[in-house]
Image: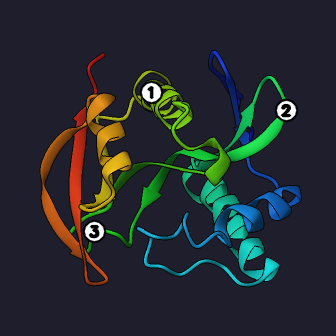
Amino acid sequence: MTFKNIVTKRLILRPITAQDVEDFFELDSNPKVHLFLGNTPVKTKEASEAMIADILQQYKTHGIGRLAMIEKRTHKFIGWSGLKYEKHLRKEFNYYDLGYRLKEHYWGKGYATEAAIASLNYGFKDLKLKTIGAAADCNHIASNRILKKIGMQPSGTFTFEGDLCNWYEMKNPF
């Protein structure tokens, strides 16, 4: 399956490759990045390789998956964003999930918002998805703020691995 890159004002969202392992390890070994993700930062590059393998399998199985977030100006990998078919987070249903994760240095600069908007547009306009969901730990103020800012509608809470999470949805507006 081949994907087209999604280009925004400051970003290129492109398919993740096995060559992204060093950047994935840098991202996911930072305890601050995992503060609201179960406090389980990765400890080995093999764990990052497994995460990438899971994304590559998503591409094959569902034709969709997270994308590398590349800063246009520097051509650096700054994180990932995009959609994936989620089967584990909500036990009661599967859904298309919007997500993002950035290296700490890039927090607070609007990159997650920019990538999330582009991902929603891709999901609704190109993939013709009817609904996209997203979840954020109730205590993760920045992520909850982003989801509200981009127009996701709060739709209750649920518990995942002992953590209370906010649930958001957006229907296709096109």
Instruction: Check contact, mark 1 vs mark 3: CB within 8 A.
Output: no
- Alpha carbon separation for disc pair 1 and 3: 23 Å
Q: Is residue 102 left or right of residue 147?
A: right
User: Residue 73 appears at what percent x and percent y?
Assistant: 80, 23
Q: Position of residue 83 (x, y in %)?
A: 49, 45
How would you rate the neighbour count of disc 3 (Cα within 10 Å): few for under 14, some for 14-19, many for 20 or more? some
User: Tag 3's secondary structure?
Assistant: loop
Q: Secondary structure under badge 2?
A: loop
Residue 41 lies in quadrant: bottom right
Residue holding disc 1: 117
The kind of residue on which mark 1 rests is Ile
Task: Measuring from the top left, give residue 137's x and y in whole percent.
Answer: 30, 63
- Disc 3 designates what residue? 90
Above-or-below relation of 103 to 21: above
Would you identify the image quadrant in which residue 169 lies? Answer: top left
Seen in the image, is 10 located left or right of residue 44? Answer: left
